[in-house]
Image (spheres, rainbow, N blue to C red):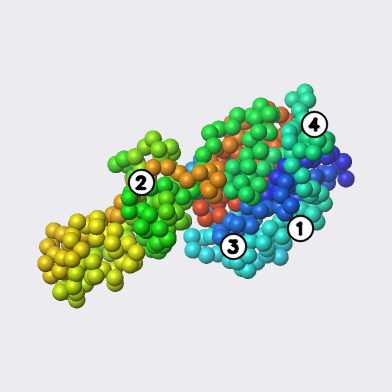
Amino acid sequence: MDNRKIIIIGGGASGLLAAARASLRGLDVTLIEKNARPARKVMITGKGRCNVTNACFDINELISNVPRNPRFLYSAFSAFMPYDTIALFEELGVETKIERGNRVFPVSDKAVDIVDALVNYAKQSGVEIINASVKSLEIKDDLVTGVILENGERMKCDALAICTGGKSYPQTGSTGDGYIFARQAGHRVTELKPSLVPLVCSNNFIPSLQGLSLKNIGIKLFDGDELVYSDFGEMLFTHFGVSGPVILSASAHMDKPGEKKYTLSIDLKPALDEKTLDKRILRDFEENKNRDFINSLSKLLPNKIIPTVVKLSSIEPSSKCNSITKEQRLALVALLKSFTVDITDFRPIEEAVITSGGVDVKEIDPKTMKSKLISNLSFAGEIIDVDAYTGGFNLQIAFSTGYVCGNNI
């Protein structure tokens, strides 16, 4: 056994895997986690089901789902791919399944099974997990020599890894402590902002749509006249704006929404082209020719959005369907194919799935996750300035960087 003392700060996905891998190499590993139970954030991923990875087995496709500093992850992904994640959890007794979009979940649909497997893997590998908060690092002669805990206790180490996560979901323990430690070690932390986050909209009809969930819709995100992103899937209107899977993905393509003119065009009927949709509306109008316009759309649209659509169409709600002109009908078609909302801001970083920004990748060796400034300091997970789209890619980043960190610390 090697008696070198290793400290891992942070018991999330990256920290637990890094600790287990380091301990399996014979190192004396202590993982410090400030929550009473590790991996609190993993518990809430995938709406409590845990989207553990994405069954994306081509490394270039995997890289293409990382919009921020993707090439930095090439070595880490090469060392530990999604199929390695799936195999690891199978070995740990957690069967997985693949769903739409190649999202991988435990067969049980319980995130707790993933958490328990990770924690048990670390413990059975010989990791000591202690419940404590780190106040600061101790650094001497360009080496980390230990940590000072909030209670004043000092713990010595021969090497240390910061795996504390970002600033999103602070109730799970991701309160940005790691950025403080990284700066203390001389590292640059890039601008921190929310990613995979709901969006604030300024339209006055938004509050009336609160709670409306839309499935099988298309979206296009524009920065002025430039198309930035398009997607298909589910979304939700809230009291402040829009949320849901396609919205969170769109947010990863946005930068400083308060300073740019972002608009979101929602195709409420993506399965129908304009001509087919016009025929459908014409048929509905024929069936309801003596009814008021506002009472003719219930087969076409959810009831909650009808008053807003009617108002935006500029057709009088009491107009009889048989009096609506072709021009008015075509304008209605255009509205349904491009229901537009104006985006003014991200919701706070505390509501984001992940943090965009972090420890500058130029200061980390991508093959080992070691600091280029302090030889016995390493990083893994969300604290690094990399982030990906929804679909299990961010947890895969945590596992891949944690694996490499633990194998090289």
Can you tell which quarter of the image residue 95 is in?
Answer: bottom right
Which numbered disc flags the more N-terminal residue, 2 or 3?
3
Residue type indicated by callout 4: Thr
Placement of 262 over or under 140, stated as above or below:
below
- Residue 50 in view here: yes
Q: Circle 3 — which element?
A: loop
How much space separates mark 1 and mark 3, taking CA atoms? 19 Å
- The residue to which callout 4 is attached is 145
Residue 208 as seen in the image, left or right of residue 83: left
- The residue to which callout 1 is attached is 120
Q: Estimate the x, y position of residue 155 in percent, counting from the top left.
A: 82, 37
Placement of 307 over or under 162, stated as above or below:
below
How much space separates mark 4 and mark 1, taking CA atoms? 28 Å
Residue type indicated by callout 3: Arg
Q: Please report the residue visible at 24 percent of the width from the left and 70 percent of the height from the top.
A: 295
- The residue to which callout 2 is attached is 202
Residue 135 as seen in the image, left or right of residue 48: right
Q: Nearer the viewer, mark 1 or mark 2?
A: 2
Q: Nearer the viewer, mark 1 or mark 3?
A: 3
Q: Circle 4 — which element?
A: strand
How much space separates mark 4 and mark 2, taking CA atoms? 51 Å
Placement of 142 over or under 274, stated as above or below:
above
Can you tell which mark lies on residue 49?
3
